[in-house]
Image: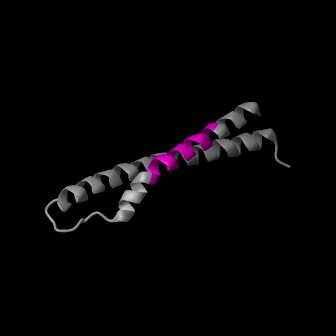
Amino acid sequence: MASIGEVRAALEQASEILRESYRSVRSAQEGLDEAVAILAESSENHHESLLPPEFVRAKERFPDQLELMVGTLERIQRLTVEL
């Protein structure tokens, strides 16, 4: 059986990993936003779009994923305080 200290340590480790993941996802979001903008602008000079529809779908999903990460981090923090 784990002690409260061990549980807190595990929760803190999970929080740090989640914070790092959040930063990585934000960076990926910024990169994708830039790529979408460049491809959309370049598409204006072509007879068909250069922008893959998957890029647009991925761009639309980032806010939900980031919100989920923030909510999870908040729940971990609440649980840590309650311990």
Q: Taking 45 as reference, is 15 above or below it?
A: above
The answer, for residue 24, to whether it is visible in the render is no
Q: Give the magenta part as a residue range.
A: 61-74
Foreground of the two, 50 or 24 = 50
**For residue 52, above or below residue 78:** below
Residue beneath the point at 77% across and 34% down = 83
Asked if the magenta segment contains residue 4, the reply would be no
Residue drawn at x 41%, y 58% is 57
**Residue furthest toward the right?**
1
Residue at the farthest left position:
45
Relative to 11, 52 lies left or right: left
Q: Position of residue 25 (x, y in %)?
A: 45, 51
Is residue 20 depicted above or below 78 in this figure? below
Instruction: Please check the rendered image and state whether residue 66 is part of the magenta-colored stretch, yes or no.
Output: yes
Q: x, y (%) of residue 9?
A: 70, 42
Residue at the limit of the structure toward the bottom, as seen here: 47
- Could you tell me if residue 75 is visible in this image? yes
Q: Residue furthest top?
A: 81
Taking 15 as reference, is 58 left or right? left
Along the viewing direction, whichever of 52 and 81 lies nearer the viewer: 52
- Left or right: 79 as drawn, with respect to 59: right
The residue positioned 65% from the left and 36% from the top of the image is 77
Give me the residue at 79% from left, 39% from top: 4
Between 21 and 1, the one lying in front of the other is 21
